[in-house]
Image: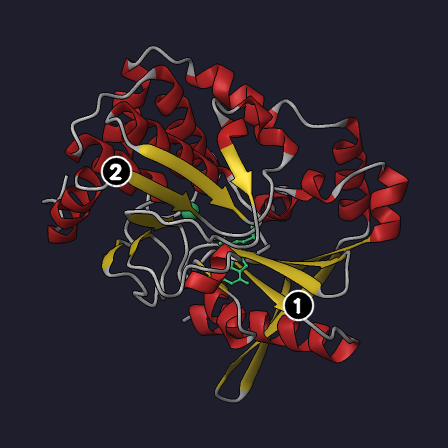
Amino acid sequence: MTSPPPELDSIRDALLGARSVLLTSHAHPDGDSLGSQLALGAALRQLGKQVRIIDCDPAPDLYTFLPDLGTIEIADNVTDRFDAVVVLECSSLDRTGLGGLDERPLINIDHHPGNVMYGTLNWHDESACACAELVSELIDTLGVPLTPAMATQLYVAILTDTGSFRHANITPRTFTICQKIAATGINPTDVASQVYNNGSLGRLRLTGMLLERMQLEHVSHLIPDVTIIHGNRVAVLRLNDAMLAEAGCTPDDIEGIVNIPLAARDVQAVVFFKDTGAAMRVSLRSKGSVDVRQVAVSFGGGGHRNAAGLTIEHPSSETDSLVLSRVAAAITDSEP
Ligand code: 5GP
Ligand code: MN
């Protein structure tokens, strides 16, 4: 394990000195944002702190099994006073979707590239596979032992953010933390089953519909005087409200489906257009050195190199084509 970052001590001292602490994370919570908030919340409560966790969106149904999920409050705005506010998993403050935080001293703990360091204290470590990796180091530094509940929360965060130990940034540190998690006596198989074997039949139907209609795009690779066409490099999935209704699904059921096309050897990137409201949400996934984060950033979104997202406020066939051509360019750029 690398030596602890200097920010960690300042963050520990700030938290130990606080009586009331607010924890928050990003809109559309995922396993990492939920698990990180709940585990840190539990640790701080063990230290006798008054802890509130406030998010702007409710957790997907899938995570109902997480211990203490019901303690997360949902609000658009925070007015109460807190001695410390910890923002987890957010590259910028607007990712929280929460008003009332701008004027406060903030503790920013995140692993997303491009974090804009909006905190008074910032602990930004892109090498972490999940924010929960940082949270678990913080809990250690606070001197709080892991309970089985905290272990479950942290494990869900790491399991989901690494795509079941497949994505980037899995390091010896990841497994050291998982060792401590398993040592609490929780059963990682049961936790994985809750996350992955507990979906609705509608989700299965929707997966079939999306894959049935999947488009495969080619990428042309220009080298001097020669154009090489690489087939089936980009998989395109499209979802609309009618498909959700036909499959009997809610938007929660979509989670994770975007990763499926990566199972094909030829596919280097996935573009998932979700036309289920006023704006178009687009999820991007890729393999290896194909950088879809840059594509997301070019449309005002963000994320990681291999998993990123963006929103198009006024979608059209032109904006769709532009996303696809930038993804194709990201693949071309990644190839020698
Ligand atoms: P997803 O496709 O699962 O919604 O998002 C994939 C990754 O990209 C996650 O790490 C998520 O936090 C990030 N992400 C998704 N949408 C946005 C966005 O609009 N802005 C930023 N900064 N990150 C995003
Ligand atoms: Mn994360």
* Residue 191 percent coordinates (x, y): 49, 20
Residue 132 bears which disc, if any?
none
| Residue 320 sits in quarter | bottom right
* Residue at image point 23% right, 27% down: 47
Query: Sequence-wise, which precedes: disc 1 or disc 2?
Result: 2
Q: Name the residue under label 1.
A: 218
Nearest the camera: 31 or 55?
A: 55
The type of residue carrying mark 1 is: His
State whether residue 234 appears in this view. Answer: no
Nearest the camera: 333 or 1?
A: 1
Q: How many labels does the image show?
A: 2
Q: Classify 211 as above or below 327.
A: above
What SS does tag 2 mark?
loop
What SS does tag 1 mark?
strand
State whether residue 146 appears in this view. Answer: yes
Mark nearest the camera among 1 and 2 is 2
* Residue at image point 42% right, 62% down: 93
* Residue 145 percent coordinates (x, y): 22, 21
Q: Is residue 98 left or right of residue 107?
A: right
| Residue 143 sits in quarter | top left
Q: Classify 187 as above or below 45.
A: above
Report the residue that reaches farthest toward the front.
80
Q: Classify 157 as above or below 201.
A: below
* Residue 208 percent coordinates (x, y): 79, 39
The type of residue carrying mark 2 is: Arg
Q: Name the residue under label 2.
A: 19
Q: Which quadrant of the figure contains the C terminus?
A: bottom left
* Residue 22 percent coordinates (x, y): 37, 44
Q: In this view, does 155 lie to the left or right of 71?
A: left
* Residue at image point 53% right, 55% down: 77
